[in-house]
Each structure stands twice: as structure tokens, then as C-alpha cells.
Image (tube, helix red, strand yellow):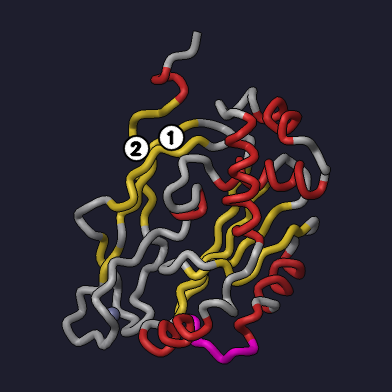
């Protein structure tokens, strides 16, 4: 019988902020002495404890705000306040939306990897997957313009692969606010598809300033 210890790796995996230099002053960023965002997440491969070590700009001349910059790899693992990983949510979304599967069948399909009830599968679909694929940029236009004028937008592009070899759910998010600016299922993951997808972020027409774009791909099975 598997124990909680087998299901959850207890040693936390700490992600580092991927930026090397400050987007405002271009000086090297320095890693913070603390870890933020510690949480336990159930993904399609394992349960694990994660956190991230932010980076800060220590240049006293820097005109930018004193913000701790997060890791772009950390937030894509799971939404804020949710212990199920995005790859679990993407898998449920794919089966329900594209495969028209019943929640009961989806629960049976993911059960070998994820301890989850049918009502949780339903909740993840309605409360996490649908908002994830809905784009929020119009609702928050005023705030996005304000961020654009102060620090610039920090965008993260994530590929969430529900099952090996099938289309990936790609999501462009503003990392400080967590808002989705663009999302879509892509069946090609080549350079051209990728460039086309990044360019078609609706904010491209809105003249907002982007200071950094990072990307990460997450697989549901290794
Ligand atoms: Zn700086």
C-alpha cells in the first residue's frame, strides 16, 4: 500500500527566477535569501512540494519599483489556491471539451495518477479550466495599462501537455497578476506555430509595454 510519503515528495523543489538582469536598469539581479509560494501540488506525474526563490534588483540607482521577481516555471504548475497541477486541469479540459467525455469517465482515466473524486473533476473543469481558457485582458485593460506604464508587463508563455503526443494547451499570462491574455490548443509545437501564437496575443494591438517574456513546457507524463 502506498503511504502519504510515497505519494508526496517531501523535499521541496525550489524554482529560481529565470531573469538574469533587471528589466528596468539591465543590472544583474540578486537571488533573495527566502523562498516564496511554498505549496503542495498534485500533478499527473507526482505529488510534490514546490516553492520559488525570487530575485531582486539591488541597484540603488534603479528607477523601477522594488519588487521580488518570481520564477516563471513556478506558477504554471498549479493555479493560485489550487493543489491540482495545470497538467491535471488541461487533461480534464481536453477530455471534456474536445473528447466530450463524462466527468465519471474522466475521473476513471486520471485515477491511476491522481487521487481525485468525480465532483472534484467537475469543479476543476468549471472553476479552473474554463476560466483558464477565457482571456481576461479586456476586463482588466485599465490595470494592464497601468502596469505597462510603471514596470511593463511580465509575460509567461506555458505549454501544458495533457497526454503525450496530443495537442498542448498554450497559455500566455501576465505573471504578477496571473491574468490570462491568450490561450489555445496547438497541435503543432514548432518554431513557426510558437511565434505565430506569441504574436497573436491581443495586447499586441494595445501598445502595452512588455519587459520580459519567459516560457516553459510541462508534460503530464515523463
Ligand atoms: Zn533595476
Q: Is 73 in front, or is 59?
A: 73
Which of disc 1 and disc 2 is earlier in sequence? 2
Residue 120 placement, left or right of 48: right
Specify the quadrant of the image occupied by residue 176: bottom left
Taking the spot 34% from the left edge, 76% from the top edge, the residue there is: 22
Residue that carries the numbered disc 2 in the rendered image = 12
Residue farthest toward the right in the current orientation of the protein: 99
Q: State the image coordinates of residue 6 (x, y, percent, origin top left).
A: 44, 19
The answer to whether mark 1 is within 8 Å of ligand 1 is no
**Vertical relation: 217 (above or below) 204:** above
Residue farthest toward the left in the current orientation of the protein: 60
Taking the spot 52% from the left edge, 31% from the top edge, the residue there is: 46
Q: Is residue 79 magenta?
A: no
Q: Measure how far apart labels 2 and 1 are at the Cα level.
A: 7 Å
**Vertical relation: 40 (above or below) 179:** above
Q: State the image coordinates of residue 165 (x, y, percent, origin top left).
A: 77, 44
**Vertical relation: 31 (above or below) 197:** above
Taking the spot 24% from the left edge, 75% from the top edge, the residue there is: 66
Q: Which mark is residue 76?
A: none
Residue that carries the numbered disc 1 in the rendered image = 48
Q: Are marks 2 and 1 in contact (CB under 8 Å)?
A: yes
Q: State the image coordinates of residue 188 (x, y, percent, origin top left).
A: 79, 58
Element class at badge 1:
strand
**Vertical relation: 34 (above or below) 4:** below
Taking the spot 59% from the left edge, 89% from the top edge, the residue there is: 206
Residue 114 placement, left or right of 59: right
Q: Is 147 in front, or is 211?
A: 147
Element class at badge 2:
strand
- Magenta residues, as a range? 205-210
Specify the quadrant of the image occupied by residue 20: bottom left
Q: Residues within 10 Å of mark 2 (few under 14, many from 20)?
A: some
Residue 182 placement, left or right of 31: right
Amino acid at each position: 500500500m502506498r503511504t502519504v510519503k510515497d505519494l508526496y515528495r517531501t523535499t521541496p523543489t525550489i524554482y529560481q527566477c529565470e531573469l538574469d538582469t533587471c528589466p528596468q536598469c539591465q543590472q544583474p539581479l540578486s537571488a533573495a535569501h527566502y523562498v516564496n509560494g511554498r505549496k503542495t501540488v498534485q500533478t499527473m506525474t507526482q505529488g510534490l512540494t514546490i516553492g520559488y526563490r525570487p530575485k531582486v534588483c539591488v541597484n540603488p540607482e534603479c528607477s523601477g519599483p522594488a519588487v521580488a521577481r518570481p520564477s516563471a516555471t513556478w506558477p504554471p504548475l498549479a493555479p493560485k489556491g489550487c493543489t491540482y497541477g495545470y497538467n491535471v486541469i488541461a487533461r480534464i479540459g481536453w477530455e471534456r471539451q474536445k473528447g466530450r467525455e463524462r466527468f465519471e469517465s474522466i475521473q476513471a482515466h486520471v485515477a491511476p495518477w491522481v487521487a481525485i473524486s468525480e465532483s472534484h473533476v467537475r469543479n476543476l473543469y468549471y472553476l479552473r479550466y474554463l476560466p483558464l481558457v477565457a482571456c481576461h485582458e479586456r476586463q482588466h485593460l485599465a490595470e494592464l495599462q497601468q502596469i505597462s506604464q510603471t514596470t511593463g508587463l511580465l509575460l509567461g508563455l506555458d505549454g501544458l501537455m495533457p497526454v503525450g503526443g496530443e495537442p498542448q494547451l498554450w497559455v500566455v499570462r501576465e505573471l504578477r497578476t496571473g491574468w490570462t491574455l491568450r490561450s489555445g490548443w496547438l497541435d503543432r509545437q514548432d518554431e513557426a506555430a510558437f511565434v505565430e501564437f506569441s504574436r497573436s496575443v491581443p495586447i499586441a494591438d494595445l501598445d502595452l509595454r512588455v519587459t520580459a517574456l519567459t516560457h516553459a513546457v510541462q508534460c503530464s507524463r515523463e
